[in-house]
């Protein structure tokens, strides 16, 4: 599975931790940056990662900023993206099971290292349940056509 990962300066440290963990687990990881804690703009990184997922250049995406809020909103502006901001394992599981999320957002200043890795693992191993949830996801995606 190919996973694109990106962050701003507020998410840089957590992005690096997640990236290293994913590589150790055998995932193909594409890191779009940022590459330091020097201030950058999260929309630039959220958008780039989302475009890779939307175009199927990557299977899934993970984005990190200070709170996860700005970068998740930015990613969700790209057609075809369902980026879920998660701060707990249950929400990450449900983001996959019920919402078929194709991107995960985390807050580098909100979620600690160990919890973040648990969230990422739950999200990546989660499966979409389909059924009644598929109908709802389809309705959600049609909103992009308004």
Image (cartoon, grey):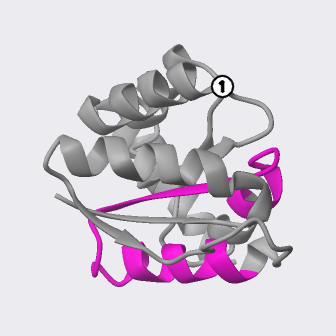
Report whether residue 79 is seen.
yes
The residue that disc 1 covers is: 112
Q: In which quadrant is the N terminus drawn? A: bottom left
Give the residue drawn at x 72%, y 42%: 107
Is residue 66 one of those drawn in magenta? yes
Residue 114 vs 23, above or below: the answer is above
Q: Is residue 35 magenta?
A: no
Q: Is residue 144 left or right of residue 130?
A: right
Q: Position of residue 30 (x, y in %)?
A: 34, 72
Mark 1 crowdedness (10 Å alpha carbons): few <14, some 14-19, many ≥20: few
Image coordinates for residue 133, horizontal then vertical, percent: 40, 34
Give percent across and percent down for residue 78. Answer: 60, 78
Q: Is residue 113 left or right of residue 61?
A: right
Task: Assign a secondary structure to mark 1.
Answer: loop
Position of the C terminus, as image quadrant, is bottom right
Front position in the image: 134 or 117 = 117
């Amino acid at each position: 599975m190919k996973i694109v990962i990106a962050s701003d300066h507020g998410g840089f440290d957590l992005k690096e931790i997640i990236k290293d963990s994913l590589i150790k687990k055998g995932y193909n990881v594409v890191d779009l940056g940022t590459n330091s804690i020097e201030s950058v703009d999260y929309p630039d990184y959220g958008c780039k990662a989302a475009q890779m997922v939307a175009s199927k250049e990557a299977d899934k995406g993970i984005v990190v900023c200070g709170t996860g809020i700005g970068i998740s909103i930015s990613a969700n502006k790209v057609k075809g993206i369902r980026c879920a901001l998660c701060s707990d394992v249950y929400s990450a599981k449900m983001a996959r099971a019920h919402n078929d999320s194709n991107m995960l957002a985390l807050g580098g200043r909100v979620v600690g290292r160990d919890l973040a890795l648990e969230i990422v693992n739950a999200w990546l191993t989660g499966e979409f349940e389909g059924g009644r949830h598929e109908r709802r996801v389809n309705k959600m995606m049609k909103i992009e056509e308004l």
